Amino acid sequence: MLSLPWNGLFARVAVLLPFSPPAARFDYNSYSSNTLDALKALQHWYDGPTGLWNSTSWWNGANCLTVLADWATLNESGPSTLRVADILSNTFSKAQLTTAVTQKTVDPDGFITSGYTCLGSQSPGSQVSTRGFPGFINDFYDDEGWWALAWIRSWDVTQNPAYLATAQDIFDDMHNGTDSVCGGGIWWSKKRDYKNAIPNELYLSVAASLANRVADSQRADYLALARRSWAWFQQSGMINDDHLVNDGLVVGPNGSCVNNGRPTWSYNQGVLLGGLVELARATGNDSYLDQATDIATAAIAMLSDRDGVFREATGCEPNCGGDGSQFKGIFVRNLRYLHKAAPRDEFRDAILRNAESIWAKNRDEEDRLGIQWVGPASAGLGPNASTHSSALDVLVAAMAVVEY
């Protein structure tokens, strides 16, 4: 799916923006209370023996962990309220012993399907030697990037050096996926059959995030790799004329690479925002924030319905699969990071508008949140840990921005 030409996008913005403010704007305490209720609901899916969340997959689990950590950084009493540190610790020790096999496919329209075989922590002894993804490393570099970011955010909460060291080890493995095809960049998987946006955005974000957190003696190396990654991404062709990121590249017979025109998934816009925020912080160069703002503004226009509520770029809802159900929350999470670094009313209003729609229209009697942010929560297959944690990202973001 190709997006509108830039002049078409501005025409669309004229129809969609400005949106009317939500009728009932909550205060910080309301957002905080709503978010805590939703976090408690998320934990009903948490499986202590595996350290993962039932009803969703391996990489989604990293995002469940990230939303917990992000919330804990905003709420001084939060970590003790939900025993967040214990959850982080349990997932760190158990999850890497749980999942054994990964299968992923992407169809010609850019729709991703993931499958994972979970053996559990009590698997037969004969399987112990092959069980799990030790160090949160597997055959897909995007999976690795999600876990690296999750442990970086967990380090932000706890300052546990093991979490940051794990993120560094994961990044080392991701770096092994870079080569000179398409002039650089990292492959999607260790099969090296698709060079696309999401693993490269994650690589950039992890490198820049580490540059902002490691010892001074290590900082320069991560920063150099982050800068190189962004320089390559800019010229790769994946950012189209609408300031939106398509899914990946086609490698031609002569080795040339061009934009494949696949969907401008919401998470492909979001992860890049977070990476550029970290790069701006690491360098003190606000031009990275300007570039992120262009992408964010275009993405908000693309994703918004007539009321300013986000729906996935392809119109797949309510049937976006186990991967697509996670995407929008990732965009909003990173939009929040950008708003903190470069505040804009349109970013804040978009976050709050979506949070209020989710809470009013997309919540069931058990405070579980579904895939369609206009509701009902029962749409599609109903709430699961992926749809719920994705919507929860918005509630956490609202809690963060309401006071800005």
Image (cartoon, rainbow, N blue to C red):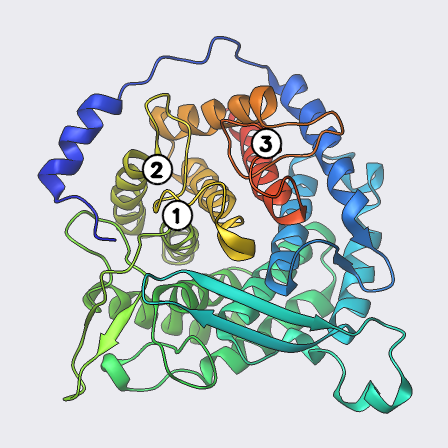
Total numbered circles: 3
Residue farthest to the top? 23
- The answer to whether 301 appears left or right of 121 in the picture is left
Residue on which disc 1 sits:
266
Q: Earlier in the sequence, mark 2 or mark 3?
A: 2
Residue on which disc 3 sits:
395
Q: Which mark is residue 303?
A: 2
Residue closer to the observer: 43 or 314? 314
Residue 334 pos. (x, y %): 46, 45
Query: In the rendered image, is residue 214 in sight?
Result: no
Distance in Å between CA atoms under marks 2 and 3: 18 Å
For mark 1, give the secondary structure.
Answer: helix
- Foreground mark, 2 or 3? 2
Location of residue 384 by image quarter: top right
Location of residue 294 by image quarter: top left
Q: Amino acid at mark 1?
A: Ser
Location of residue 343 by image quarter: top left
**Disc 2, disc 1: CB below 8 Å?**
yes
Q: Earlier in the sequence, mark 2 or mark 1?
A: 1
Q: Amino acid at mark 3?
A: Leu
For mark 2, give the secondary structure.
Answer: helix
Residue 39 pos. (x, y %): 73, 37
- Foreground mark, 3 or 1? 1
